[in-house]
Image (tube, rainbow, N blue to C red):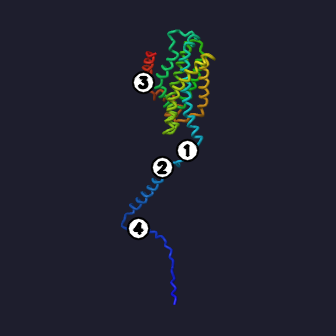
Amino acid sequence: MSNTVATEVTEIQPVLEAPSFNPTEPKGSLESSHNISADSRSLGHAIANELSVPPPGAELTPASTLHLTLTILQPSLINFLSSFTNGVITVGLPTIAQSLSLPRSLYLWPSSVYGLTSGSLLLIAGSVADLLGPRRVELVGIFILGVFTLACGLSTTGVQLVIFRALQGFAMAMHLPASVALVAAGVPEGKSRNIGFACLGLSQPLGFSVGLVASGIMIERAGWRSGFYVSGGTTLLAAVAALWMLPNVKPDHPNISTIGRALYTEIDWIGGALASGGLAMLAYVLA
C-alpha cells in the first residue's frame, strides 16, 4: 500500500509591521517625530549631493582645459614681454643713449624709472583692482602697456624715453595685482592654480633672459627700436585677445553708476600716497 504524501509549498511573504501607535503619546510628539524624520532625509540627500564626485578616471573637458590654459597664459605672456623690454634696455642702453643723445646724468633712468613707478603704485593699483574688478584693470593696464612700449620705440629724445618708461611702469602696476587675482579666481584650487602662480613667477626672469640674448641680435641687425616694436605690438595683440581669454570676476563694487564715489570713499588715498611716496623715495635713492 503506497502512501501519497502531498507537500504544499507555501510562499513566504514579508510581514510589514504597521508603526506602533501609543494612545497615551501626545499628538505633538508624533508630529515632531515625523518632521525630524523628514528633515533627516532632506539632510541626507543634501550631504549625498555635496559629496558626489566624478569617477576616478574622469578628466576635464577639452574646452575647460583650454580655458584654464588661456587664463594662465595671457598674464604670463604680459610678464614675459615686459621683462623682455627690460632686457632690451639693459643691453641696448649704450646704443640708445648715443642715438637719443641721452645726458650722462640720465643714463640709468630708462631702466630704473620703470621699477620706481611700478613698485610705488602697486598698493593703490591693487585696491582699485579689488574695487572695480581685476578684469577691467587688467584690460586697461595691458592696453596702456602696449601703447607706451611702442611709444618708447618711437621716442626721439632721452626725456621722452624716460617718460614713456615711467608710464610703462604705471601700466605694469595695474597688471601685476590684477593678474594674480585673475589666476586665483579663474583657476581651481590645487595643482592647476599652483602651476598658474608658478608660470606668473617664471615668466619674468625668463623674459628678461630672452631679452638679454635676443636684443643683442636685434640691435645689431634691425636697430634698438625693433625690440620695442615687437614687444609693444605683441602686447596689444594680447590685450585684444584678453577680451575673450580672461575670466569674469565679480568686482567688490559692481554698480558702474557709483564707481566714482566708491573710488573716493572706499580707498585710502592718503595712506596709499604715503606708502607710494616712501617706496618711490627708496627706489630713487637706490637708483
SS for callout 1: loop
> How busy is the neighbourhood of tag 2: few (under 14 within 10 Å), some, or many (20 plus)?
few
Q: Are marks 2 and 4 in contact (CB under 8 Å)?
A: no
Measure the C-alpha gap from mark 2 to mark 3.
45 Å
Residue assigned mark 2 = 51
Q: Amino acid at mark 2?
A: Leu
Residue 258 visible? The answer is no
Specify which label sits upstream in the sequence, 4 or 1: 4
Q: Is residue 267 left or right of residue 75?
A: left
Question: Which residue sits furthest right?
Answer: 222
Left or right of 273 in this view: 60: right
Q: Quadrant of residue 242?
A: top right
The picture places residue 255, in percent across and down from the top left corner, at 52, 34
Task: Identify the element where label 3 is drawn.
Answer: helix
Front residue of 98 and 26: 98
The numbered dot on residue 88 is none
Instruction: Look at mark 1 in the image and give the residue it sits on.
Output: 59
| Of the image marks 1 and 2, the number of the one nearer the N terminus | 2
Q: In this rendering, is residue 25 above or below 48? A: below
- Kindly identify the residue that appears in the image at 46 percent across and 69 percent down: 16
Q: Looking at numbered disc 3 in the image, what kind of residue is underneath it? A: Gly
Label 4 and label 3: CA atoms lie apart by 72 Å
Q: CA distance from mark 3 to mark 1?
A: 47 Å
* Residue named by callout 3: 271
**Residue visible at 53% across and 23% down in the picture:** 209
Q: Is residue 217 visible?
A: yes
Reply above or below: 271 against 158. Answer: below
Q: Residues within 10 Å of mark 4 (few under 14, many from 20)?
A: few
Most extreme residue toward the left, as rendered?
A: 24
What is the CA distance from the residue labelled 4 to the residue labelled 1? 51 Å
